[in-house]
Amino acid sequence: MKPQIHKYQLKLTKKTMSKRVKTILVCALCALAFACKSNQGYKTHNDELHWSYQGETGPEHWAEFEKDSDCGGKHQSPINIISTDATVDNTLKDLDTHYATNTKIHEVVNNGHSIQYNFEPGDYLNYKGDKYELKQIHFHEASEHTIDGIRYPMVIHMVHVSDNNQFVVLAVMVKEGQNSEPFTFLESYLPLKTGQTKTIDASFDLNKNLPNNKGYYNYIGSLTTPPCTEGVNWFVFKNPITVSLKQVKELQKLMPLNNYRNEQPLNDRVVKQTK
Ligand SMILES: [Zn+2]
């Protein structure tokens, strides 16, 4: 009996041991996974949450702590567009936008920096032989670009991306005035808490969100949020659209106060404009 007990105990010990080893291994793996995850999390955190519009993580510091970004580059956005300095280019044509009436907005996201509407494929624009698909629209209050020093209460950024990852962003200035029907639709899915996403899955005609006069300023700049990627082709419409004060306020209260980046130096760049 004795040896049997011993055997049994040994077996048990072995079992316990292997269980322990297993536990340790699992823990080690967990720790590793957690470390990797938190490392990744940190990166994500850094990319999407760490930067802000105020204080130590505000725009003036993006270049310091967003190490791999272009935020300290020489061709950044936004800029103040000086209309008399912008070169009139007769070769600039109306933007070749293809916004269908039945393109669907997939969802709306409050990402903590802005309210963003993600679109399903369908809307695009052609520019110099390349197709740029509309991915999302989002808002800044007040506007990021200024025109002759004028900062509008709000701007809509319409972000288009080509197959080879080139950006075309359209900026539609918003001024306070008449109620906007498309805004009523967009805002019917609000409010949203920070980090919250709501499925929309309904058609939206982007044409209704554009000014009647489609004259624009054009220059090469950057994304206005980290990683501030350069090489972005900006088209800033000269004329604003009108949205009611109530509608502006609705979006304003959901976004960080003053979620705009300040004017960046033009440096050696040229701003062109339609006549
Ligand atoms: Zn933007």
Image: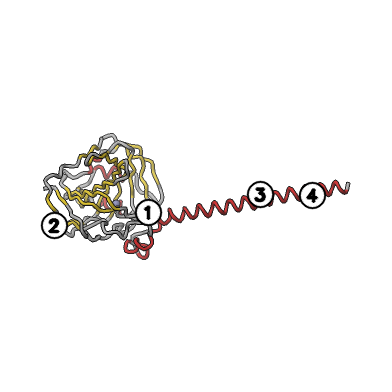
Note whether 86 is above or below 201 in the view shown. Answer: below
Instruction: Work out how far the residue at label 3 is from the one at label 1, CA to CA, in angstroms.
Output: 41 Å
> Badge 1 is on which residue?
112
Task: Tell me the kind of residue under disc 2.
Answer: Asp
What is the number of the mark on residue 10?
Answer: 4
Secondary structure of the residue carrying tag 4 is helix
Report the disc number at residue 22.
Answer: 3
Is residue 73 shown to the viewer in this render?
yes
Dot 4 alpha-carbon crowd within 10 angstroms: few under 14, some 14 to 19, many 20 or more: some
Towards the viewer: 182 or 76: 76
Which residue is the extreme one toward the top? 102
Mark 2 lies on a secondary structure that is loop
Q: Quadrant of residue 83?
A: bottom left
Q: Answer few, some or many: residues within 10 Å of disc 3's Cα (few below 14, many 20 plus, some between 14 and 19).
A: few
- The residue at the far right in this view is 1
Q: Nearer the viewer, mark 3 or mark 1?
A: 3
